[in-house]
Amino acid sequence: MTADHAEHGRRKDGGGTGHPEGGGDGDGTGTVTTAVPARLDRLPWSRWHWMIVVGLGTVWILDGLEVTTVGNIAGRLSEEGSGLAVSSAQVTGIAAALYVAGACVGALFFGWLTDKYGRKKLFMVTLVVYLGATAMTALSFDAWWFFLFRFLTGFGIGGEYAAINSAIDELIPSKYRGRVDLIINGSYWLGAIGGSLLSVVMLNTDIFPKDLGWRLTFALGVVLGLVILLVRRHVPESPRWQFIHGRGEKAEALVSSVEREIEEEKGEPLPRPAGEITIHQRKSVGFGLIAKTVFRDYPRRAVLGLSLFIGQAFLYNAITFGFGAILTKFFDVPSGKTGYYFAVIAAGNFLGPLFLGKLFDTVGRRIMISSTYLVSGILLFGTAWLFGRGSLSATTLTACWCVVLFFASAGASSAYLTVSEIFPMETRAMAIAFFYAIGTAAGGISGPLIFADLTESGVVGDTVLAFRIGAGLMCAAGLVAAVFAVKAEQRSLEDIAAPLSSVAPATK
């Protein structure tokens, strides 16, 4: 077996519905032949797909709202009369690191449950965890309470990353998978824009007292989350997960209903699916098999996943939590005004995946992943040089970051896309969780702590060093992608990495 084998499963020409060859009855386990993956991949874009995007993708808006809000209110929370005895460095350092640590733990915990119990159950549970923790954050009366529920909020968000990214890629046709995944992950920055502008209003003491505005900001996140919870009820379970886990009949029934709905919408019959796959159904996959599959069978892909996540995690977690502190410390921007600046770089972040996303499906994964990481890293080195020379103002620094993050955001979103599609279906949620957790622990926890310490010193050279570390890691990840990235554009997930349950595996 080679490091980058791409297809194990037996394929047949033609289409049709799945049918058992052994003991599979749709709710047990056995050997089944199914055309479900091919049937999903050949679907044209429809209202049903928009429902998936809205139901699953909008949670990143909440994540962006959360992280940005905390970054922008750091200065206010440290002021006398805020209701909390914390410093700005504690908010951007300790609280930020705890949020990310919670996300790492949540990703691993819920990722395992997602592969075992299904995508739908877990993306409902994780959203409820997020909502409860956010509500309790709004009620913070002491620093320890605030820190605890920042951890638990991250715990829920981390689970969302594993459950939702796996569901999205398994439900979206292969022709559109790259751009849709990037844009959905990039929608985080719509929340960031909202959080930035919202903080301007909520931190205005002419409207809200110092100890109330930031609490109402968290409460609004709860309200938005409840709306998403209602929409998400209509998102179905992944048929790919169903047919592998002994629910073949449910998978067939779901896909058939979607096909009828789309045929009625388009007014014409769908083309025949490209082929079938035969698999041995199983209830669950153990950690040992997952680890062996990821690291022994796909070592090059494992290195790729780690590199992409470490680079983007350090850059984004450090800057997202620390940008407001840089503006207030080095450019004397009032804490109540930092939201305007952050809204600008958040817009650049969203526009990156929006305009570059299609190229990941057409130009290809390897070229686009490597170039977005390298270009953003090189531009960040340039920004660090200008900052060190004292050539930047608050406005021009924001403009530089806007350009850097236009490219970095597309690259960062592609990290989630990459680890979601390059490993076998049975390991998908755990693979996302593992690489997110390890990469984020390396860059996302250390990033805010290092960055907060460097910016708190008030020494320009220290902040330049932080910029250069982020730039170097992004460039390194880009070079790894140039060598190891997988040609996954417009290919079925089962072709990129055949299920472990495939019958008659063949090396390629």
Image (cartoon, helix red, strand yellow):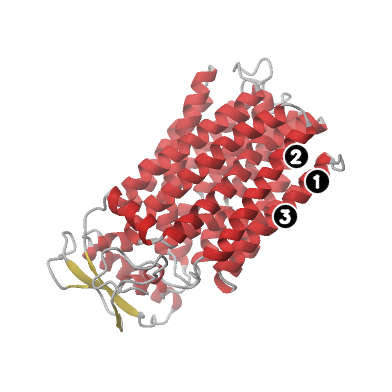
Residue shown at the point (21%, 58%) measured from the top left: 282
Q: CA distance from mark 2 to mark 3?
A: 14 Å
Q: Is residue 503 left or right of residue 381?
A: left
Query: Looking at the picture, how far across and down is residue 354, in whole percent?
Result: 62, 61
Q: Is residue 194 above or below residue 246?
A: above
* Neighbour tally class for label 1: few under 14, some 14-19, many 20 plus, Cα within 10 Å: some
Q: In the rendered view of the protein, which quadrant contains the C terminus?
A: bottom left
Q: Is residue 139 visible?
A: no
Evaluate if marks 2 and 1 touch, with contact meaning CB atoms under 8 Å apart: yes
Measured as percent of width and height from the top left, residue 275 is found at 32, 79
User: Amino acid type of disc 3?
Assistant: Ile
Q: CA distance from mark 3 to mark 1?
A: 11 Å
Q: Sequence order check: which comes first, mark 2 or mark 3?
A: 3
Q: Residue at x 12, y 66 (%)?
A: 23
Location of residue 364 in the rendering, given as x and y in whole percent from the top left corner: 56, 71
SS of the residue at dot 3?
A: helix
Secondary structure state at the residue bearing disc 2 = helix
Q: Position of residue 204 (x, y in %)?
A: 72, 28
Residue at 30% x, 65% y is: 254
Q: In the depicted view, which residue is nearer to us: 48 or 157?
A: 157
**Sequence order check, earlier mark of 3 and 1:** 3
Q: Is residue 297 visible?
A: yes
Q: Amino acid at mark 1?
A: Trp
Which labelled disc corresponds to residue 464? 2
The residue to which callout 3 is attached is 378
Residue under the image location 31 percent in, 59 percent down: 241
Q: Residues within 10 Å of mark 3 (few under 14, many from 20)?
A: some
- The residue wearing badge 1 is 385
Residue 411's mark? none
Q: Secondary structure at mark 1?
A: helix
CA–CA distance in space, label 2 to label 1 = 7 Å
